[in-house]
Amino acid sequence: MKKLNWNERCIQHGLEQLPVVKDRRAKEDIYERLERARRAARWKRRWLPAVASAAVLVAAAFAAPRLIIPEPADKQVASSSAVQTWRANDVSSHPEAMMATEVSNEAVSKAVIALPDRKIGMVVPVVVPLFGRFALEERLTAALDELNRSSLRSAAKWLDGITMAPEAGNRGTWAVRVPADHRIFTADREEQQLFFMAVVETVRQMGGQNIRFFTGAEEGLDLSASGPLKTTKVDQQKRIYYINRLSSFGHAVLISVPSSARSFSEAVQRMKKPGGRGLEPAIPPEVKVDHVHASGRHATVSLRFSASLDTADAARMAEAILLTAKEFGLLEVTLAANGRSSIGPYPLGERIKVPAGPNEELLTAGGR
């Protein structure tokens, strides 16, 4: 029997040909099922050839005379094609494989990079669309390349030359490597703190839980104004999104702030209050929250507001609600409002997938 040399590239190419299947389960559930499927596939690769060989030997014992007759070449080709078809069908028969394709496509289509903004003393997370398929460890570099071609290149330069990637065998711990000649080592204390906040928020947005810092290949950073830094734990506290109109980017931005809200419903109510330090409530005073209900991975939010509400503020409010929902583990939100069919680009009365991140318009605003 011809042995097929399947490698990761071939498998990835095969998965890309599969149709997209929608799935609303938690990523942890999908990952667990994928692991089971991978172990099952490994078992098949190890034992099916042996079983097949044993079957051939048994058949040979009963039909030895027939085995001495050469098999026509066309039948050999057909047999090999049948094996390839069987393996392809075996992959496509597992919904986990198709779900992995969809999850992978969504995961690599955008990355969220937090940019330092000294004017407001905060970091501004920006979602960056990526054109092409990238492994997780390649996403930061690809996103920074996009930012360096945009009006945000000045802020993005604080992350030049830095790599952030999950450690092998431990996706929760990320290694952040800073070149020895990076300008952060001679920056003042405020800039170093903003740099640290930007790195932590970027890793948090990518799903990291712990960070190990390196200067080149040597573990740890020796920051002149802030002292040595080797490791840090990413705060997993849920965030609420607020509006800041004073950013140096010349555009109103959404900024996430840790909150002690115990539920998404409570978080929405808190979004009607200022967040301090120039952070305006994402839900303006003229908007009334009639109802918030969350069930499983879906939530419904009913709003009531006047027609005088600025269109851009209304769209920003809807985006902030969706992003806050994502912080609380929700995947979809249905928005409703009096006498309206949409809020900005978001249709009302329909399930809306939570966005990958905020402030994507900064890439096209041209710094206005």
Image (cartoon, rainbow, N blue to C red):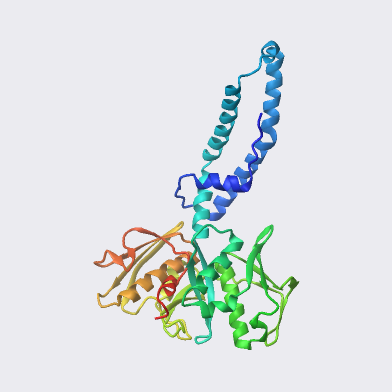
Q: Which residue is depicted at the point 68% across and 15% down? A: 67
Question: Exactly how many numbered labels are in the figure?
Answer: 0
Residue in the foreground of this view, choosing between 312 and 12: 12
Relative to residue 354, is residue 287 drawn left or right? Answer: left
Q: Does residue 244 sit above or below 340 in this rendering?
A: below
In the picture as drawn, the residue positioned furthest to the top comes out as: 65
Which part of the image, by quadrant, shows the C terminus? bottom left
Residue 302, position as x, y percentages in the image: 33, 66
In the picture as drawn, the residue positioned furthest to the front comes out as: 73
In the picture as drawn, the residue positioned furthest to the right comes out as: 218
Q: Does residue 125 sit above or below 170 in this rendering?
A: below
Examine the image and state in which quarter residue 295 appears. Answer: bottom left
Residue 128, position as x, y percentages in the image: 49, 68
Residue 163, position as x, y percentages in the image: 63, 69
Q: Which residue is depicted at the point 58% across and 22% down? A: 75
Q: Does residue 165 sit above or below 120 in this rendering?
A: above
Q: Which residue is depicted at the point 63% across and 89% down? A: 188
Residue in the foreground of this view, choosing between 274 and 144: 144
Q: Which residue is depicted at the point 63% across and 65% down? A: 165
Say if residue 247 shows up in the picture: yes
Relative to residue 213, is residue 325 drawn left or right? Answer: left
Say if residue 236 shows up in the picture: no
Residue 113, position as x, y percentages in the image: 53, 71
Which part of the image, by quadrant, shows the N terminus? top right
